[in-house]
Image (cartoon, grey):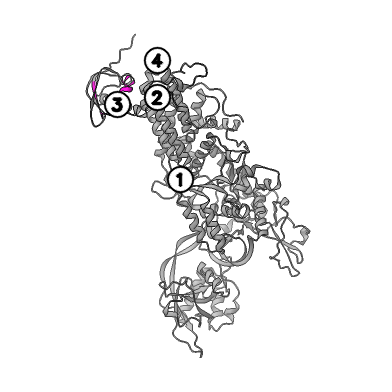
Amino acid sequence: MTNAPTTPSPIPDRPSLDGLEDKWAQVWREERTYAFGGTADRSKVFSIDTPPPTASGSLHMGHVFSYTHTDCMARYKRMAGFDVFYPIGWDDNGLPTEKRVQNFYGVRGDATLPYEPGYVPPFAGDTKSIKAADQQPISRQNFIELCDELTVKDEEAFESLFRRLGFSLDWDIQYRTIDDRSRATAQQAFLRQLARGEAYTAEAPGLWDVTFQTAVAQAELEARDYPGAYHRVAFHRVAADGTTGEPVHIETTRPELLPACVALVAHPDDERYQGLFGTSVTSPIFGVEIPVVAHPAAEMDKGAGIAMCCTFGDLTDVIWWRELRLPTRSVITRAGRVQAEVPAWVADAKGDRGTEVFEEMAGKTVHSAREVVVEALRASGDLDGEPQKTQRKANFYERGEKPLEIVTSRQWYIRNGGRDVELNEALQARGDEIDFHPSFMRSRYKNWVAGLNGDWLVSRQRFFGVPIPVWYRLDASGEPDYDAPIAPAEDTLPVDPAAQTPPGYTEDQRDQPGGFTGDPDVMDTWATSSLTPQIAGDWRGAEAGTSDLFGKVFPMDVRPQGHDIIRTWLFATVVRSHFEHGSVPWTDAAISGWILDPERKKMSKSKGNVVTPEDVVVEHSADAVRYWAASGRLGTDAAYDTGQMKVGRRLAIKLLNASKFALGFGEPELEPRQGLASVITEPLDRSMIAALAHVVRDATAGFEGWDYTRSLDVTETFFWTFCDDYIELVKDRAHAGDPSARAALRLALSVLLRLLAPFLPYATEEVWSWWQQGSVHRSTWPLVDELALGQPGDPEVLAAVGAALSQVRKAKSDAKVGMRSEITSATLQTPAALAPLVQQGEPDLRTAGRLTGTLDYAEGEAVALVDVELVPFVKPPKQT
């Protein structure tokens, strides 16, 4: 592989950050500086399961923050001798993309419409002001084509920004979660899980978003406050002789579900209801007879202590329905409205007005149906008092705007330990095999797994996604046989059952009795994203014997990601790897925090406090923005801080200017095959090199401990000491040709550039090109052995002389004279142990501080220059 320029380039008269990004991005692309080499020895490979950003709009500073963390580690590992596998993918299937396409083009998909070749959408821009009902309906395939078209445009913009930020990705290893490779991988993994019994279809109650008309998984839930009201409602006791006793009052925020009530539930230890267990009551208005049962999940101190179980009002209802084996009496449809037909249990009940009230509810939204029921309860006298307003917690789809309903539908699931104790324990144990950074993030993983209450729902009722790859035989009456799905052969993948026929059938048999039908659903986007190691690593190629890449990179070394998707992306990937490979998908998980605005609130589009990175990078430079990002530790939220970016910009500019100055002294004269270290003999030079060896040790330990912020901090601190103290102290000696000073400057600069390269890739590459061959990013990470001298130095000498130089500057500043003024006499007070150290570097101190006369030493608690006599510097007049 070719690296960056092979010969040094001239040092510019005025080094600048301007133009460096365009210059070096082009070189890195042409020279394939960051390409994966394909090393066969797995121990020499460092593989990264790079997060594929969602291609549905613009990137934000959170992307810059977390991807910079990963890139710093990738650059370190590459310099440390690893062949770095650093792919990039784009997560472009799923609901976010569909919403963006709807808003961008002003369209919505309709599976009943025919395909229109050459379709041109009505808009091409932001149409959020257009109501959903006014969006132009188009066919499934036309809609998918628009999704594909827009995501490609978005991905081109994303790539441009990622390249500008200097992310050292291997751009030859790209994928999209909707391309043929990803679809085939997701479908093959699904079919294997189906064959092993890990994937299954079932008709069951599930969370449903009425806006997006799709099922929602537990991991996608978001609990939000939602206004409601408690209604105290009377149920009527039924005595053995047919007489009624005192009513049983319950409190509910959802009276519209009274016709769906299947039981009243109280805690088995609640003495108030002991005599009711095993008896029946009738529901108000509807007169449906329902049992009173006990369950430990009932809360004695909440409301009346007894609750109605409806099918289905919330997840607790589902638990009670399942564990108490209660009947199903659903009345809310997928559209979020009450069903049109009066259910049999209402029509056959003894309620005086049940049928009449239900007919009035039929077809109405949940809110309107509630008003109907409440008015009927008032009229019947079964509403005790008026509704009491409250704020209740309701489940929302994380991208939705209305509370979720629970409806019964046929969906696909993958077993994840939510209903299997043994599997749950095994998946929790997988968490112990992964090193989380920071380590406390492991508890988030294990707590999530332990709290699961159902399997992973992976089917979605959308368009732009990976199709569920099965068909169903239809019997003589046209009913599908869900128990024996028809699966395609692995070598035919990917397939689209809505557009392709199963083996042995023809298209004219589609949806005909005795024929077949294709599964209409697509997979949840996490069902594809959970296979990013397999997609990027070409698992299918390994299975088919056409590629050996997977064995070189899997299990991968690290999964970098945000802490908010531990429950989704991280866990789902562990599930898939556990089943398919019997292992964890990676050995380490690096978890980033969130970006907060200056008021410490999370940045999000919904809050309107998002800052787009494009303008920030142009204003401050990529190196400066990377410096800000690298200053935030893993797992810690960080504030968006342009002040920190300005600090980073100053550091990058100082690196350019100080390097030009240091290199301007010229090279030391060396004998053939003589190294720089061999001519570094002066005490101050040896001290600087010894101090730098400690920095190398600490910076390396920081990276090895996944604490790149520590690496940056120790390197930056030393760099400013190097510039402010060491260069100032030795510049006259270096200018005069002293080989020790010149060698020390160049050796230190070589090491510092490599230490800073992961953080400031552009400035370091620029300086490296002035005097070295190849790319700094393909050079070796500095080792302490490089800084071994024949006579080791004392790192405290530089610190002591630097402290003395600071006092010299202070004395001149206090006297309000220029730094070129001479000191003809002074006394340096120091603690006793420091005086010998300062004396070792006194010649350089005298030259740098213009100490031309007597310098006495005295013992003191701190370093201070006293009894100073000065001769102010007078600038000579210009000669005419």
Quadrant of residue 663 within the rendered picture: top left
Q: Are marks 2 and 1 in contact (CB under 8 Å)?
A: no
- Depth check, front residue: 608 or 399: 399
Q: Are marks 3 and 1 in contact (CB under 8 Å)?
A: no
- Depth check, front residue: 135 or 702: 702
Identify the element where label 3 is drawn: helix
Q: Are marks 2 and 3 in contact (CB under 8 Å)?
A: no
Of the residues shown, which amino acid type is indicated by label 1? Leu
Which residue is denoted by mark 1 in the rendering?
A: 634
Q: Position of residue 30 (x, y in %)?
A: 60, 31
- In the rendered structure, which disc, 3 or 1, sits on the residue that comes first in sequence? 1
Of the residues shown, which amino acid type is indicated by label 2? Arg
Q: Position of residue 594 (x, y in %)?
A: 45, 48
Of the residues shown, which amino acid type is indicated by label 3? Ala
Q: What whole-number distance in Å separates the C-alpha atoms at marks 2 and 1?
A: 36 Å
Position of 485 relative to 371 (above/below): above
Quadrant of residue 231 within the rendered picture: bottom left
Q: Position of residue 449 (x, y in %)?
A: 52, 58
Q: Magenta part of the protein: which range?
A: 826-845
Which residue is denoted by mark 3 in the rendering?
A: 804
Q: What whole-number distance in Å separates the C-alpha atoms at marks 3 and 1?
A: 38 Å
Instruction: Using residue 546 as the reference point, say whether residue 13 is left or right of it.
Output: left
Tag of residue 133: none
Of the residues shown, which amino acid type is indicated by label 4? Ala
Residue 322 in the magenta stretch? The answer is no
Tag of residue 736: 4
Identify the element where label 1 is drawn: loop
Q: What whole-number distance in Å separates the C-alpha atoms at marks 1 and 4?
A: 47 Å
Which residue is denoted by mark 2 in the rendering?
A: 686
